[in-house]
Amino acid sequence: MSAAGDRRGRASLPSVDVVLRHSTAAGPARQHGQRVLAEAVRTELARLRDTIAEDESSPDVDTVLAGALAALELRRGSGVRRVINATGVVVHTNLGRAPLSDAARAAVMAASGYANVEYDLATGGRGSRTARVGLLAAELCGAEAGTAVNNGAAALLLAVAALAGGREVIVSRGELVEIGGSFRLPEIIAAGGATLVEVGTTNRTRVEDYRRAIGPGTGMILKVHPSNFRLIGFTEDADLLELAALGAEHGLPVVFDAGSGLIDDDASAGIPDEPEVRAAVATGAGLVLFSGDKLLGGPQAGLLVGARDAVERCRTAPLARALRIDKLQVAALEATLLAHLRTPVPLEVPVIGMLHADDEVLRRRADALAGALARAVPDAAVVTVALEGVVGGGAAPGVAVTSHGIRIGGPHATRLAARLREQDLPVIVRVVDDGVLLDVRTIDAGDEATVVEALRRCLEARTRR
Ligand SMILES: *Cc1c(COP(=O)(O)O)cnc(C)c1O
């Protein structure tokens, strides 16, 4: 029982001043700032006042301070920080999707001060924020023109608003998808100020269905890659090439939301069924949209490539300003596009490198990781395992990416996973059938020693209990 234990109830709680003047408060006050700490103490005292029963002993100053600091930690401690991704999911939306290449990181650093984002160094006049990424994206995709906005959803919203605002957008019923929780196609179309016209059925839609729906109010034809789900069995969807021809016949823009940003088959690493942006552009569709941070392996961004007039209408639409890409994204995107322009399979872009990782190399890395852990923790129940990972980011659903890693058995797999998350450099793992799985594909080779050390600490904490 504390020294204050004899004093009973809420009335005897220390005051804010008493807590702040206490000798143990000096360090936290320096660390967090006096005002922040005072506010946390006030909040903690209010909480105690509400929860302590009248006849309960009143907590002492140290207890109040500890409570306030714990609340502060909770609020401030978990800002965005680096983690080690041992899940094997290459494009992990919850872990920041694509890790950037060294060149893209350097470009972000360089742009984080003053930078010529909208300044033309040749003339000293105003420049365009997206002119260069637009050119690079267009060149990479074989398009007349290109531009970029904040993300894929913004690209679609902008295309709808700019090309079909106040008019109708024709979409197949098989493509009215929801992607990632808050991206629902009908809602985006409504938000873009257009009216959705559904054609076909869930499993079959033909070009004739689109043709019949075209009328005086039609603003555009939209085709959406369903990304995170697949219809199998008796299905049919209209070919983009045929839709592009239909659009041309009626003078209507045809927009294709390709989603994942696979540029062409070279970069696919054998992933089936992902649309290739270059091939889509080559059909003559007016506009092809894709994300920057999925299979392209760059920063969060939404790219729009295609016919010059369609891109220009998007670029100059009033909404474009609200959806614009920020300078750090521009810098990283330029570097990523340049890497793709240099070679069809830029392995230095981490997403591309990880998807193309050699099976034998992954197996050897898993062996080495298991060996290092067995040396560090002789009684660790560690074995190497063949794993099935996924691409992630809504790309190639249902397609397993075979990989290699280690499995750690023994009691309390969930608790081990939780301890790994609590490390200064958190290690994110999968728990399957009471085992902790680490897939080496997504672990940077330079982080392997850190992973072994984290595992050693966490496993030793487990045996101490
Ligand atoms: C991922 C995806 C989007 C959303 O892109 P964000 O960059 O996440 O905003 C839109 N459409 C398709 C087809 C997608 O796969």
Image (spheres, grey):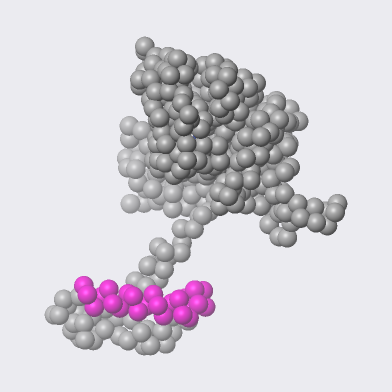
Q: Residue 189's quadrant in the figure? A: top left
Q: Nearer the viewer, residue 142 or 209?
A: 209
Note whether 340 is above or below 250 in the view shown.
Answer: below
Note whether 178 is above or below 241 in the view shown.
Answer: below
Q: What stretch is highlighted in magenta?
A: 28-51
Q: Nearer the viewer, residue 277 or 31?
A: 277
Residue at 43% across, 23% down:
213
* Chief SS of the magenta region: helix
Residue 192 shows up from this direction: yes
Q: Does the magenta stretch include residue 189?
A: no
Residue at 21% across, 86% down:
11
Residue 295 shows up from this direction: no
Note whether 77 is above or below 435 in the view shown.
Answer: below
- Point out residue 205 in the picture as x, y percentages from the top left corner: 41, 17
Residue at 43% across, 77% down:
37
Judge from the rendering whether residue 391 lies leftward or rightward of residue 118; answer left or right. Answer: left
